[in-house]
Image (spheres, helix red, strand yellow):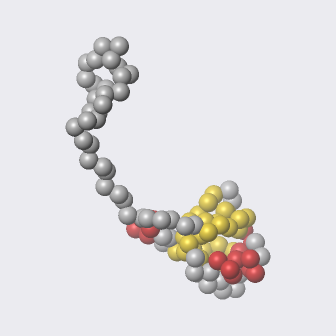
Amino acid sequence: MELDILKHFIGMNVEVLVAGVWMEGNLKPIVKGVVVLQPIGEMMQFYGPSSMKADVIQAIRQVKKLSTTPQPPLPSSDSTKIISSFEQSSPTKRFVVVK
């Protein structure tokens, strides 16, 4: 990909398509045609920065994530009951929604 296209994405969280695989990260400044992606979110614990030549990038798109923190599950009220699949139930009541 051409450098004048990539320069608009410097400092943004992006996904780049390289050899048919989408890679996600924060695009660092481009030096001598080498693009560096710093992992973002949960991937920072597992991966380090990745670098590649600018001409191997097939596509680029900006990533916008609203929230990276996991949301706690909603507490179930007494009006709805979740039935385990291990519990015995008759075939007539197996697919009835309990309210």
User: Which of 89 and 77 lies nearest the eye of the viewer?
Assistant: 77
The image shows residue 24 at horizontal and vertical percentages of 56, 66
Quadrant of the drawing holding the N terminus: bottom right
The image shows residue 29 at horizontal and vertical percentages of 61, 84
Kindly indicate the quadrant of the structure image that contains residue 84: top left
Q: Residue at x 35, y 19 (%)?
A: 94
Kindly indicate the quadrant of the structure image that contains residue 13: bottom right
Residue 50 can be seen in this image:
no
Q: Residue furthest top?
A: 91
Q: Residue at x 40, y 68 (%)?
A: 45
Q: Residue at x 65, y 73 (%)?
A: 52
Quadrant of the drawing holding the C terminus: top left
The image shows residue 30 at horizontal and vertical percentages of 65, 83
Q: Residue furthest left?
A: 78
In the picture, measured across the screen, residue 73 lies left or right of residue 31, that is: left
The image shows residue 68 at horizontal and vertical percentages of 42, 64
Report the number of discs: 0
Residue 44 can be seen in this image:
yes
Image height of 52 relative to 84, above or below: below
